[in-house]
Structure formats: C-alpha cells, structure tokens
Amino acid sequence: MSGEQFLRYGGNTPCIEVRCGAEVLIFDAGSGLREAGLSLMSEGVSEFDVFFTHTHYDHIIGLPYFKPIYRCSSAVRFWSGHLHGTMSTAEMINDFMRPPWFPVGPGICQASLDTVDFRPGDTLSPRKDVSIRTMSLVHPGGCVGYRVDWGGRAVALIYDTEHEPGILDPTLLDFIADADLLVYDCTYLESEMAAYRGYGHSTGIHGSRLAMAAGIPRLAMFHHDPSRTDAALAAIEQEVQAFFAGAFAARDHQVIDL
C-alpha cells in the first residue's frame, strides 16, 4: 500500500532481516526484499540466507527484484520446508520467476545460488553458532514458523497462522518459550475472526496471550491487514497495549535490538 494514510507503518509486504553479530539472515521475500538487498549490498554483504515461511505472493513478490541474485560477487541460499514432499525450493523458484509472470527465469542470475529443503520440525544451522528451530503453522497451503537462537538471545517468527478461539497451543508455547521477541500474525481484530475463519491469520490479543504465557517481554504485531491506515493501526496498537504493555505495531525499517 502507498499514500498519505500509510506513511507511519509503511506498505511493504513481509521481509524481516535478523542480524546475529556479523551474520545476516532474511525471512521472506516480500516487497521489502528489494530495499533490503540494496541496503545490504551498500554495506558490502555478499552472502545471503533467505528463509521462506511460505510462498503466497505477498511473501515472495520481491524475489525477482533482489539485486544480489544478479551479481556474480554474491552467494545466496534459499531455504523452505512448507512444501516438503510436494515441491522443492528450486522448483518453486523456477515456477514463480519465469514468463509470463516475469520476463526472464533464474538462469539469468549471475550469483552463486543454492537451495535447501527441510522438514518442519528440523533444526537448521545456517551460520556458525546460529540455531534455527522450525515448526508447522496453521495456514492454507502450509507455513513454517522459525525460532532463531544466537548468543543467548532468541526471536520467534510466528506468521502466517490461525489460532483456535480460547486455546493457547501447547506445542507453540513450548516452541516460543522465553524468547526475547515474538513476531506474530496480527492481521485481524478479535471481532473480525469469525468472518475470516479459515483464512490462516490471527490477532494481536491472541498474540499477547501467547507472549504472556510464554514469558516473552515484547510482541511485534506483524502482517497487518493491508487496508489498515496509520490511524487504524495506531488505534489497534493502543487497544492491544492496554491488554499487554509489551506489544507494538511493527513498521517498515524498524530496528529492534535484543
């Protein structure tokens, strides 16, 4: 989204950069990936690990515009597990980035490209001393949640997912327990969930309940409904903060130091 009503929180689709010291990890390839690629290249970063939660358009639309894949000086690894047993990461990229949806295929890329397939539930070790746990989330077509642990700190990325009303999933609580930050799918309001049951999304209030039960001090409300204006998101943020003071509405270019 763009326009005067969407300036504070921004309108890019999901793309999260996680830094573990000098190591850079990227989660999802939404429209924010274009800017992320340019920024990281300007810093001299040449090795990239990109993890897909899933491959609905809003989470992959930035991939063809990720400039590092066109540079021979870059090395990029793509990771996915939500399609395990049905489609590999390489097949997914080849099917998405080709005519008639894009003028050229991945063969034009000059970077060293690699793909890694995993099963949800696997623990990944993409870089030295970085551990990433994975789990399946409730979303049409499948989705993977990630927990990144490094240097005694942890961030849990739990989106896109849908909750059962009134139930705190014990498997999810164990997965996110004692993380320093929970990034959670807060697309809808509690009053909207009945109308959108089965869409695979959740709410800020439920995310707050999870954070409190799991001993997590901060909740980043993520994956906003794209129709929400700045004023609407500010009102939602205020409402959720009244329930859990550690909650905040995530925005474009936001930096959170753990």
Image (cartoon, grey):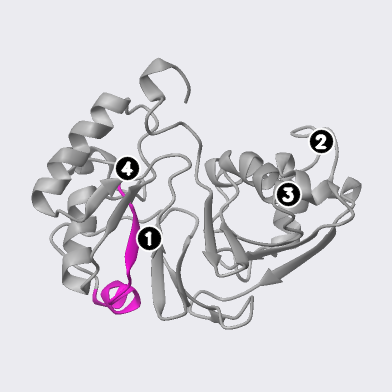
Q: Quadrant of residue 52?
A: bottom right
Image height check: is 2 above or below 177?
Answer: above
- For the residues labelled 2 and 4, the Cα–Cα distance comes to 32 Å
- Binning the other alpha carbons within 10 Å of mark 3 as few (below 14), some (14 to 19) or many (20 upward) gives some
Location of residue 22 in the rendering, given as x and y in whole percent from the top left corner: 62, 68
Q: Which residue, given by chain and number where applicable, does mark 1 sit on?
A: 138
**Label 3 sits on what residue type?**
Met
Mark 1, mark 3: which one is toward the viewer? 3
The mark found on residue 49 in the picture is: none
Earlier along the polypeptide chain: callout 2 or callout 4? 2
Left or right: residue 3 compared with residue 117: left
Q: Is residue 178 magenta?
A: yes
- Of residues 34 and 200, the one drawn nearer to the viewer in this rendering: 34
The mark found on residue 187 in the picture is: 4
SS under mark 2: loop
- For the residues labelled 3 and 4, the Cα–Cα distance comes to 31 Å
Q: Which residue, given by chain and number where applicable, does mark 3 sit on?
A: 41
The residue drawn where x is 16% and y is 61% is 209
Location of residue 255 in the rendering, given as x and y in whole percent from the top left corner: 44, 50
- For the residues labelled 1 and 3, the Cα–Cα distance comes to 35 Å
> In the rendered structure, which segment of residues is drawn in magenta?
170-186
Image height check: is 51 above or below 101?
Answer: below
- For the residues labelled 3 and 2, the Cα–Cα distance comes to 27 Å
Earlier along the polypeptide chain: callout 1 or callout 3? 3
- For the residues labelled 1 and 4, the Cα–Cα distance comes to 14 Å
Left or right: residue 62 compared with residue 72: left
Would you say the residues marked 3 and 2 are in contact, meaning their CB atoms lie under 8 Å apart? Answer: no
Mark 3, mark 2: which one is toward the viewer? 3
Count the labels in the image: 4
Q: Is residue 62 visible?
A: no
Q: Which residue, given by chain and number where applicable, does mark 2 sit on?
A: 99
**Label 4 sits on what residue type?**
Thr
